[in-house]
Image (cartoon, grey):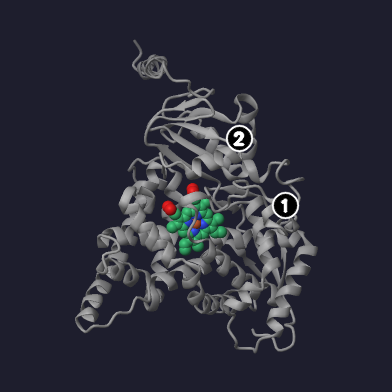
Amino acid sequence: MDSSILPALLIALFIPILHLVTRFKYSSYNLPPGSLGFPFVGQSISFLRALRSNTDHQWYQGRIGKYGPVSKMWLFGSPAVLMAGPAANRFIFSNKDLLFTGTRSMNLLSGRNILMLSGEELKQVRGALQNFLSPEMVIRYVSKMDEEVRRHVKGNWVGHKTVKVLPLAKRLTLDIICSVIFGQEAGSVREALATDFPAMVRAALSIPVKIPFTRFSRGLSASQRIRKLLRGIARERETLLQQQQAHGASAADDFFAYMLALRAEGAHSLTVEDIVDNAIFLLIAGYETTSVLITFMLWHLDKEPEALAKITEEQDEIARNKGPEDALTWDDVSRMKYTWKVAMETLRTIPPIFGSFRTATRDIEYQGYHIPKGWMVFTAQSVTHLDANIFPEPSNFDPARFENNSSIPPYCFVPFGGGPRMCPGNEFARTETLVTMHYLVTQFRWKLCCKEESYKKDPSPTPLLGLPVELEPRCLPENAHA
Ligand code: HEM
């Protein structure tokens, strides 16, 4: 027999055998409809292709049309169930038998962070992160955010005829989260992280095999360098904290000091290595998402003169009441109500995180279907965000939808997830977005260089050209700060 036929023959035999084994193993289960497809790969390629061509919404609708709101498949190496609609969101976000899941590559890259934890450990870490990102703490970060945004605008925007928004927004949000996580030392760490983070993030949806020059192996090398750098800082903080405690003093002014001080008080028992892994996760969660929101606000506002005029009015009014060097305060941020409505409409139409993934820790049941232990379940934000029954004329950009938040039914607007694992960084994200928009809107007018520029999801929404815009300086309102 021709030796090249052998692998094809083995695969041809293997697939029906695996399907038979699966059918036998789950013969007493009422599994959701849908084909599992080719083992391990299944629908991964068509799904990734849909994300990268920004046709994932049509992909979900195609499945919902064919199988209904619950359907099974193989995705990223695991049997998986897509659940669609508000009831599915509620089920996924609040079911205690569903454990947060990253992709296999993400888990290998980012170590033992909050996503991997369960039980008491999860409670401790979630509590610590929630406190670190609570509104009371965010109030203290406003001046750091203001300082970073002004530095960026002055250095990267003022005096430029064209800029690429996405890379600038990424660098800005990375610098903001670095200044909060590393405190005084942010400057020395930023450059190293700015090179290694994109490689690590790009590897999150790659196939986790260590072959040189692949996305995954580049991401893994980057994550090892990041870990080494952060481990050094965490160890320094540990020594400093021990010295301070010996003198009866304590200063928890950055993430490492904060987490180490909490450990000393007995609030959690994470090792330095675990704290480093959580810092890495916080950095990624903090900069990838908000930069996408800022970028797409500018994208929308280019096409929406009415919304731009209203934001400008709101921001000019705030600027008029401040001296040239006055930093924005929490009160100023609280007055940016219309700007936040525009942000919410941007989050509805282009959510920075396209879906939420969980794994069943035991056999569970949903709408009469059985979902076996170990299977993955997922929901996609766009299913409810673009549902005309929930948001009429969903493709229209209309910030007025958020005039009365209570009119939006629960579990329908979920850019930050929901339930006990809802994003704890939402207040942080809101504040840095509003501070950034204040300086951009009061100082510039912009025009997209390429009106037709579209975007892909890789995995977060990414304009194909990075959103180059032509900039024009604006005259600031009288008294306004620069
Ligand atoms: C516009 C900006 C942001 C969006 C749209 C966003 C969205 C999300 C979503 C959808 C989840 C998962 C929820 C789930 O599957 O149930 C999440 C989790 C998380 N986010 Fe955000 N996020 C943003 C900004 C931030 C920021 C700025 C930080 C930190 C500074 C942050 C920290 C986290 C953390 C720590 C988790 C994990 C929570 C857990 O495992 O319990 N996020 N975020």
Q: Quadrant of residue 105?
A: top left
Name above or below for residue 474 compared with residue 281. below
Q: Three-letter amino acid code at disc 1?
A: Glu
Q: Is residue 395 above or below residue 431?
A: above
For this view, does 379 lie left or right of residue 443? left
- Image-based side of 338 in relation to 274, left or right: right
The residue lying toward the viewer, choosing from 53 and 402, is 402
Q: Nearer the viewer, mark 1 or mark 2?
A: 2
- The percent coordinates of residue 378 (x first, y second) are 50, 38
Label 2 element class: helix
The quadrant of the picture occupied by the C terminus is: bottom right
Residue at (39, 76) in percent of width and height: 183
What is the distance, in whole Å, between disc 1 and disc 2 at their CAs? 25 Å
Q: Residue at x 57, y 69 (%)?
A: 431
Residue named by callout 2: 60
Pick the residue in front: 219 or 369: 369
- The label number, if any, that marks residue 452 in the structure image: 1
Q: Amino acid at mark 2?
A: Tyr
